[in-house]
Image (cartoon, helix red, strand yellow):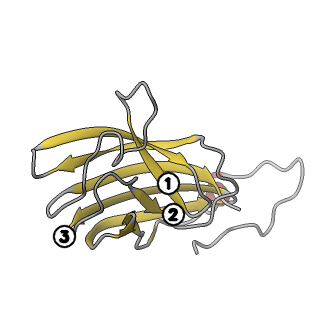
Amino acid sequence: MATQWTAGLTDNTVLPASTLNQIGAAWETWTPTLTQSATVTFTNTSSRYMRIQKLVIAQTYLTVSGAGTAGQNVLVGLPVTAQNASGQIAGYGWLYDASTTTVYNVIAYMTATTSVSLMYTPNATGGAFGSNPAVTLGASDQVRLSFVYEAA
């Protein structure tokens, strides 16, 4: 887990820039999970996150090398357990389907405390990506996401 800075804080104190620069944490790397009913193999091209108190900011770039399960939701694992899974929007990104050379703009939303689900943004019906539209993850597909949420 990213380190936290908490020492030396007192109420009603003006903090100089040198102190403020210490607050927060450096970016940390992590390897998320990627599932579409079952675990999908991938290369973790770049996944990093930072945590400031309970705020988690994460970015991930995955290149798929295996295959998902047709008609099933795509889930990406979180670096830190989330406070809740209320269905709130946590971020955005895109998924590149190499077999059809199609880029899908997606939102990442909280449906579990350990992963985000993806939703294809043009779907007015609100279907989860993978089942609506029915897209199967396959070799050379790419998943890129940025999201922010509250840690447990």
Assign a secondary structure to mark 1. Answer: strand
User: What's the distance in space between the residues labelled 3 and 1, CA to CA?
Assistant: 20 Å
The x and y percentages for residue 57 are 52, 54
Reading the image, the residue beneath label 3 is 65
Q: Residue most toward the right?
A: 11
For marks 2 and 1, the one nearer the N-term is 2
Is residue 24 in view from this perspective? no
Q: Is residue 144 above or below residue 3?
A: above
Assign a secondary structure to mark 3. Answer: loop
> Which circle, 3 or 2, is nearer the viewer?
3
Q: Amino acid at mark 1?
A: Val
The crowd level at tag 2 (other Cα within 10 Å; few <14, some 14-19, many 20+) is many
Q: Quadrant of residue 64?
A: bottom left
On screen, residue 139 versus residue 82, left or right, reads: left
On screen, residue 44 versus residue 12, left or right, reads: left
Q: Are marks 2 and 1 in contact (CB under 8 Å)?
A: yes
Q: Amino acid at mark 3?
A: Ser
Residue 143 numbered mark, or none? none
Reading the image, the residue beneath label 1 is 116
The x and y percentages for residue 23 are 64, 60
Q: Residue most toward the top?
A: 124
Residue at 10%, 45% (x, y): give it. Answer: 100
Is residue 111 in view from this perspective? yes
Reading the image, the residue beneath label 2 is 78
Residue at 37%, 29% (x, y): give it. Answer: 123
Q: Look at the image and tell me in which quarter the C terminus lies.
A: bottom right
Q: Quadrant of residue 94?
A: top left
Q: Amino acid at mark 2?
A: Leu
The crowd level at tag 3 (other Cα within 10 Å; few <14, some 14-19, many 20+) is some
Assign a secondary structure to mark 2. Answer: loop
For marks 3 and 1, the one nearer the N-term is 3
